């Protein structure tokens, strides 16, 4: 069933995003009022011209009337251009502000939201739905009111010519607005369905364009195209229904205008034959009737835009009403330097009825290195996600230096915890922006120093514009090793107290891995580190070892002690080969 949006919600939305543009709205209102006055004056000038042409021998009054008509018409066009510019500018500023608010809200939503919504569907809401609100913000209320005032002004002037004429035109206007509103309620649901289908289609398209390499490599192109055409076939009937809704409103308007013209002709002919009105007045009545078509047509267009806005406002409202499950902490500060890590009987599951981590309980002293081992799906990466508060624990707690993660500000927490994974995101932008994430407090000399320490000196020298060189989205033009080293440079520059290396060197060839070993050694100085690894060489620098199996701790202790204990799981890994035991 179609949701009904309260008027106060429209008012609240307009007030929120138009209040900063009060001056522009006032100017727009004044210009539209001036335009209304000129539209009402012009028919009076034409009536004077016609009646004067019949009764006066001198041409001077006619020249004056013609000059006045041309002058008023030209001034009206200038006012229309200026008002259109201001209105579009107001709409653009307001929609961009709303677009920014929605995008920022999406960035704050937790990972469970982003897992359940494709990037294409989110983009369609941030861009497509908000584009439908451009006219709603730019001039909906002002234009609607000005057109209503214009119609009311014409009716007042027609009543002056005779109450029957005024009453006839009043009935015409009421019938026109009622008919348009009646048809509108059948058309509105189809626009909502169309927007929903649009989000599904672009969500599907964005997802598969992003994964086109895997699609082609696995021979799934035919399936993707089958789904593509299936969605288009589903989209077409909805598009046709939405178009029919628009067409029904357009046809209704044409029929109503034809009836209005017929009423105007009939009344004018009757009164002219009776000698009650002049020929100029006949033309004026007809002119006003024709002129009424414009504001009524605009009102119809506004109603059409409103029906599009209805669906978009509902979808945007639902998105903004989505509350993040991860709430920002109250702001307990985290100390500088290395951070101890405590998992206090942590329980966690991505779904309510399953547990990914079950009773994880250990303490890692600050400045120490923990090696986390386990098969795929044992919960290693989940631990890293919990440390960054991408998710919150179901039970228990995680402490950094005796501060519960949920009590620290998210921005502070994620500044104190750095993470390097095997999947590196390189976005379109400069080398500097990719390394600093747009922070302007890191000097270029520091960035270059870090690049040289990581063995990227030659690569950096090959950049044509240095730190201002552009990198392609997805890391095109970079080797896997170079992209991985850039991710390490990011961590160096953020200077966290806790570092998580999630199989960070698994994509590197031996030569590149050797380059990064020295950088890792330096990175770990005066920092706490958690290394998630499958490879034996990576874990040799660990002080302590944690082994997970199906989300449970099966072993935790000092690495050298465990290695010397032939009964320990870690000792058997060393004897048999860790890669084989974790396969």
Image (cartoon, grey):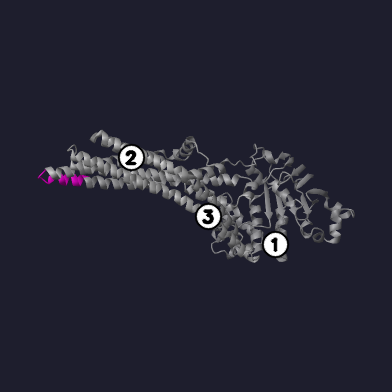
Q: Nearer the viewer, residue 427 or 63?
A: 63
Q: Main structural element of the magenta stretch: helix, strand or loop? A: helix
For mark 1, give the secondary structure.
loop
Nearest to N terminus: mark 1 or mark 3:
3
Residue 353 is at least partly visible in this image: yes
For mark 2, give the secondary structure.
helix
Left or right, 359 with reference to 469? right
Which residue in the protein does label 3 denote? 235
Residue 194, magenta (yes or no) = no
Q: CA distance from mark 2 to mark 3?
A: 38 Å
Q: CA distance from mark 1 to mark 2?
A: 75 Å
Q: CA distance from mark 1 to mark 3?
A: 42 Å
Image x and y of residue 252, in percent? 38, 46
Q: Nearer the viewer, residue 140 or 447?
A: 140
Label placed on residue 172: 2
The image quarter containing residue 33 is: top left
Image x and y of residue 166, in percent? 28, 36
Image x and y of residue 224, in percent? 60, 61
For this orientation, the residue located farthest to the right is: 566
Residue 57, magenta (yes or no) = yes
Nearest to N terminus: mark 2 or mark 3:
2
Image x and y of residue 205, in percent? 57, 57
Q: Mark 3, residues whose alpha carbon is within 10 Å: few (<14), some, or many (≥20)?
A: some
The image quarter containing residue 365 is: top right
Q: Which residues are magenta?
A: 56-68
Nearest to N terminus: mark 1 or mark 2:
2
What is the count of numbered marks? 3
Residue at image position (63%, 45%) is: 110
Residue 478 is at least partly visible in this image: no
Label placed on residue 507: 1
Residue mark closest to the camera, 2 vs 3: 2
């Amino acid at each position: 069933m179609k949701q009904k949006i309260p008027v106060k919600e429209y008012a609240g939305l307009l007030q929120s995003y138009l209040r900063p543009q009060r001056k522009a709205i006032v100017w727009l209102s004044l210009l539209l009022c001036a335009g209304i006055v000129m539209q009402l004056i012009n028919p009076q000038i034409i009536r004077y011209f016609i009646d004067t042409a019949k009764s006066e021998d001198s041409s001077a009054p006619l020249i004056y009337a013609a000059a006045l008509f041309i002058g008023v018409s030209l001034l009206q066009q200038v006012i229309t251009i200026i008002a259109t510019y201001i209105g579009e500018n107001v709409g653009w500023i307001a929609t961009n502000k709303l677009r920014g608010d929605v995008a920022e809200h999406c960035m704050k939503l937790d990972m469970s939201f982003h897992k359940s919504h494709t990037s294409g569907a989110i983009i369609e809401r941030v861009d497509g739905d908000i584009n439908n609100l451009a006219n709603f913000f730019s001039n909906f209320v002002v234009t609607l009111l000005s057109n209503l005032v214009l119609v009311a002004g014409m009716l007042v002037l027609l009543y002056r010519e005779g109450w029957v004429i005024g009453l006839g035109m009043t009935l015409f206007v009421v019938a026109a607005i009622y008919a348009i509103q009646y048809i509108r309620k059948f058309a509105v649901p189809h626009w909502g369905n169309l927007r929903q289908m649009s989000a599904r289609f672009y969500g599907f398209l964005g997802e598969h364009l992003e994964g086109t390499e895997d699609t082609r490599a696995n021979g799934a192109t035919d399936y993707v195209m089958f789904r593509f055409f299936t969605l288009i076939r589903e989209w077409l009937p909805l598009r046709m229904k939405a178009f029919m809704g628009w067409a029904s409103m357009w046809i209704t308007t044409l029929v109503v205008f034809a009836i209005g013209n017929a009423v105007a002709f009939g009344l004018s002919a009757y009164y002219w034959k009776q000698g009650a009105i002049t020929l100029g007045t006949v033309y004026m009545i007809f002119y006003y009737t024709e002129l009424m078509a414009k504001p009524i047509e605009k009102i119809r267009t506004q109603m059409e835009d409103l029906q599009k806005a209805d669906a978009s406002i509902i979808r945007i409202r639902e998105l903004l009403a989505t509350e993040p499950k991860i709430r920002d902490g109250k702001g307990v500060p985290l100390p500088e330097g290395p951070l101890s890590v405590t998992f206090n009987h942590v329980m966690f599951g991505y779904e309510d009825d399953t547990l990914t981590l079950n009773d994880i309980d250990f303490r890692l002293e600050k400045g120490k290195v923990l090696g986390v081992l386990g098969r795929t799906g044992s919960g290693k990466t989940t631990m890293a996600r919990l440390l960054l508060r991408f998710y919150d624990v179901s039970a228990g707690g995680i402490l950094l230096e005796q501060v519960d993660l949920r009590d620290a500000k998210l921005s502070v927490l994620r500044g104190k915890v750095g993470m390097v994974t095997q999947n590196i995101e390189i976005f379109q932008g400069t080398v500097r922006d990719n390394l600093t994430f747009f922070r302007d407090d890191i000097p270029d000399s520091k960035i270059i120093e870090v690049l040289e320490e990581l063995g990227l000196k030659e690569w950096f020298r090959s950049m044509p514009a240095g730190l201002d060189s552009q990198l392609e989205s997805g890391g095109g033009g970079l080797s896997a090793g170079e992209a991985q080293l850039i991710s390490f440079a990011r961590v160096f520059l953020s200077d966290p107290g806790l570092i998580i290396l999630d199989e960070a060197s698994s994509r590197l060839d031996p030569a590149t891995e050797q380059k990064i070993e020295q950088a890792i050694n330096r990175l770990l100085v005066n920092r706490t580190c958690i290394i998630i690894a499958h490879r034996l060489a990576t874990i040799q620098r660990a002080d302590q070892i944690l082994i997970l199996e199906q989300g449970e701790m099966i072993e935790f202790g000092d690495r050298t002690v465990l290695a010397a204990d032939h009964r320990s799981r870690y000792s058997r890994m060393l004897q048999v080969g860790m890669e084989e035991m974790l396969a």
